[in-house]
């Protein structure tokens, strides 16, 4: 499956290498050459993962990572730091700043792709091909199918992405604006009540097999996928 990856790297040769390999691995790449451009891009849309060079002209990668971790909206986005520095002190500083993993240049393209996959699995499973089994539902991103009990559930593309995100982060509550950011990729132009419309459609589609109660409204907070059966409302 396609993850949207924001690459912040100023060296043209490495830009080309990264873009070619990530695209081949099935990802969508947005490439920027400095932290300021990265921040502008992030303000528009949250990527599934950020591959962030440490040494950049202007604001450093470390400083950008620190800022992203300091803001509620950008805090959950996984960050992999990319750097020529290999020593243990820098590695620890990178991880303390909030990077989720760390790759030292020069790196092998295979290692890069594998590390990205591992971080996505851990932190952004909705951006992977892994099937999710929860609460009697099985969602398969590869075939784009959902089985409820033995029955096939038919969903529109937005409901599918919404359910995938909620199931991949089961039991966690997400606000409408978080869902717009992470599922729609647009928290600026899409209205929050759009989320309610698609939640309603999703519940309606799950109703026939009695799985609609898995999609819970948490009053004043948002929505969650929960197998606990108790609606907090
Ligand atoms: Ca650099």
Image (cartoon, grey):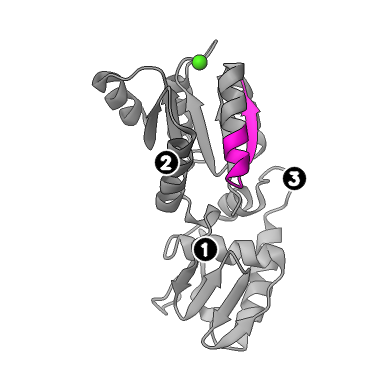
**Toward which corner of the image does residue 151 lie, by quadrant?**
bottom right
| Closest to the observer, 230 or 99 | 99
On screen, residue 183 versus residue 113, left or right, reads: right
In the displayed structure, 208 sits above or below 183; it is below
- On-image quarter of the N terminus: bottom right
**Looking at this rendering, what residue extends furthest in the right direction?**
189
Q: Earlier in the sequence, mark 3 or mark 1?
A: 1
On screen, residue 7 versus residue 172, left or right, reads: right
Q: Nearer the viewer, mark 1 or mark 2?
A: 2
Q: Which mark is residue 166?
A: 1
What is the span of residues highlighted in magenta in the rendered image?
Answer: 20-34
**Was residue 25 drawn as part of the magenta stretch in this picture?**
yes
Crowd band around label 3 with a 10 angstrom C-alpha radius: few (<14), some (14–19), many (20+): few
What residue is shown with label 3?
189
Instruction: List x then y, in percent, for residue 228.
Output: 38, 76
Instruction: List x then y, in percent, for residue 30.
Output: 65, 33
Q: CA distance from mark 3 to mark 2?
A: 33 Å
| Closest to the observer, 83 or 60 | 83
Q: Secondary structure at mark 3?
A: loop
Instruction: List x then y, in percent, for residue 212.
Output: 56, 80
Q: CA distance from mark 3 to mark 1?
A: 22 Å
In the displayed structure, 59 sits above or below 194; it is above
Q: Which mark is residue 115?
A: 2
Q: Nearer the viewer, mark 3 or mark 2?
A: 2
**Looking at this rendering, what residue extends furthest in the left direction?**
88
Q: Secondary structure at mark 1?
A: helix
């Amino acid at each position: 499956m396609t993850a949207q990856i924001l690459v912040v790297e100023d060296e043209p040769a490495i830009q080309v290498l990264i873009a070619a390999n990530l695209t081949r691995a099935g990802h969508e790449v947005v490439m920027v050459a400095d932290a300021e451009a990265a921040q502008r891009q992030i303000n528009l849309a949250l990527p599934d993962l950020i591959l962030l060079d440490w040494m950049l002209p202007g604001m450093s990668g470390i400083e950008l990572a620190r800022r992203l971790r300091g803001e509620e909206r950008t805090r959950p986005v996984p960050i992999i730091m990319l750097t020529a520095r290999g020593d243990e002190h820098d590695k620890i500083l990178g991880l303390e700043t909030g990077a989720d993993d760390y790759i030292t240049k020069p790196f092998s393209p295979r290692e890069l792709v594998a590390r990205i996959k591992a971080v996505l699995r851990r932190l952004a499973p909705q951006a992977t091909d892994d099937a999710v089994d929860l609460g009697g539902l099985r969602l398969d991103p590869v075939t784009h199918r959902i089985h409820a009990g033995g029955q096939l559930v038919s969903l529109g593309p937005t409901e599918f992405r919404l359910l995938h995100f909620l199931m991949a982060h089961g039991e966690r509550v997400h606000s409408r604006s978080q869902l717009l950011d992470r599922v729609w990729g647009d928290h600026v132009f899409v209205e929050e009540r759009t989320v309610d419309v698609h939640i309603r459609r999703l519940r309606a589609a799950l109703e026939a097999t009695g799985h609609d109660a898995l999609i819970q409204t948490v009053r004043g907070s948002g929505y969650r996928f929960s197998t606990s059966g108790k609606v907090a409302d």
